[in-house]
Amino acid sequence: MNRDLRDARTSTRDANAWARRAGARDALGVPAAVVAAGMLGFGALALEAGIGLTLAALCTAGIWALPGQMVLIEMHMAGAPGVLTLLAVVLTAARFLPMSISLMPILRTPASSRGTLYAAAHLVAMTSWAWTMRRCADMPREARLSYFIGFGGTCWAVSVAATIAGYYLAGSFPPIVRLGFVFLNPVYFVVLLIGEARTKLAVAALVCGAVAGPLAHLVNPQWSVLLAGVAGGSVAYLIQRAMGGPRA
Amino acid sequence: MLVCGCVLGTYLWRGVGVLLSGRISVNSEVFSWIACVAYAMVAGLVSRIVVMPSGMLADTALGERLVACGIALAAYFLCRRNILVGVGAGVAAMMAIAVARAA
């Protein structure tokens, strides 16, 4: 009996380690390369702004959200007041609320500890969210949290390393290559979002969001991400409901 | 100081998300709405970057960016939904367009 229990625990640990490794393996392809490219650019930007290497690496490790980090650096360079900068950075991160709310019920099991879930929440980012939402649907529930930690943790570690590398490499990229790096992020999300939209509701949300994004930016750049998401998402949801289609 | 504030402010959304997620079932209408909002937010940010970029991308034309995105998607679907091929083709297309214009 005891032995069975011990075997069961060992096999759970083994299964978790396996799922973490699977997540790390999946991360070490395009996702890590894309995240690294963005963070290389951030390292270069931090150097230009006259920010220390340690602080730049801490930004990536602590914030780990490229839009927020870029807002922080650019407003700091423009000499904006700290309170405004803080507000802008925190607003750019509002997208993590719905991501975290929608991801956690997929990852959570009755056995998962609160500490692990709150630690895992730090790894919620655009790439890890979009990828895990897609992959975890076909995965046994017990494996999902470990998979996500392996995937997100790997992307996070790569990001910190890439920031440091970018800081040192800054200025040595020719402009054409830099342009490619800058374009990598948007084109990655274009392919991922359009290619992997599986439900009618997801397609509706993508279309409405894509239309709302630039419009909201014209109205108010600082609120645009939040505004486009809430407005576009709500319209998509209502259209789908009115048509009586299947849920997400 | 400012960086600490930004770190905490950013984590706040993620942590509150965990807190709230316990009260919202995966199949509820609220969850569908939240998933919609999250998708729309990311789609909105990406389309804004493609349509109205800042920084280096602002020096390229809208048509050039759209062509590069189209090539990326075409490569992705032609290579049986290979994200790596799609993204690589998009980046290569953008660099080729820049080289062609400079020449």
Image (cartoon, rainbow, N blue to C red):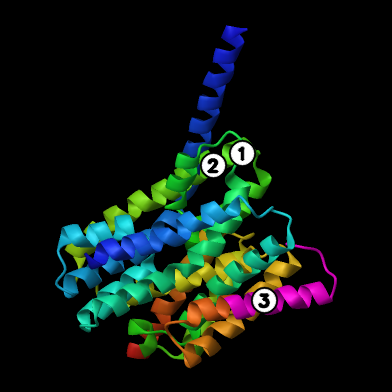
Q: Are marks 2 and 1 in contact (CB under 8 Å)?
A: yes
Residue B7 position in % (x across, y down): 32, 61
Q: Residue at x 47, y 57 (%)?
A: B14
**First in residue order: circle 3 vs circle 2:** 2
Foreground: disc 3 or disc 2: 3
A12 sits to left or right of B2: right
Q: How many marks?
A: 3
Which stretch appears magenta? Answer: A230-248
By secondary structure, the bulk of the magenta-drawn segment is best described as: helix
Q: Which residue is mark 3?
A: A234
Q: Which residue is mark 1?
A: A109
User: Label 2: how many residues lie within 10 Å, few (<14), some (14-19) or many (20+)?
Assistant: many
Which chain hosts label 1?
A
Q: Which residue is mark 2?
A: A145
Above or below, B96 relative to B7: below
Q: Quadrant of residue B11?
A: bottom left
Determine the CA span between mark 3 and mark 2: 29 Å
B51 sits to left or right of A71: right
Residue at mark 3 shares a chain with residue at mark 1: yes
Residue closest to the eye, B63 or A47: A47
Amino acid, disc 1: Thr
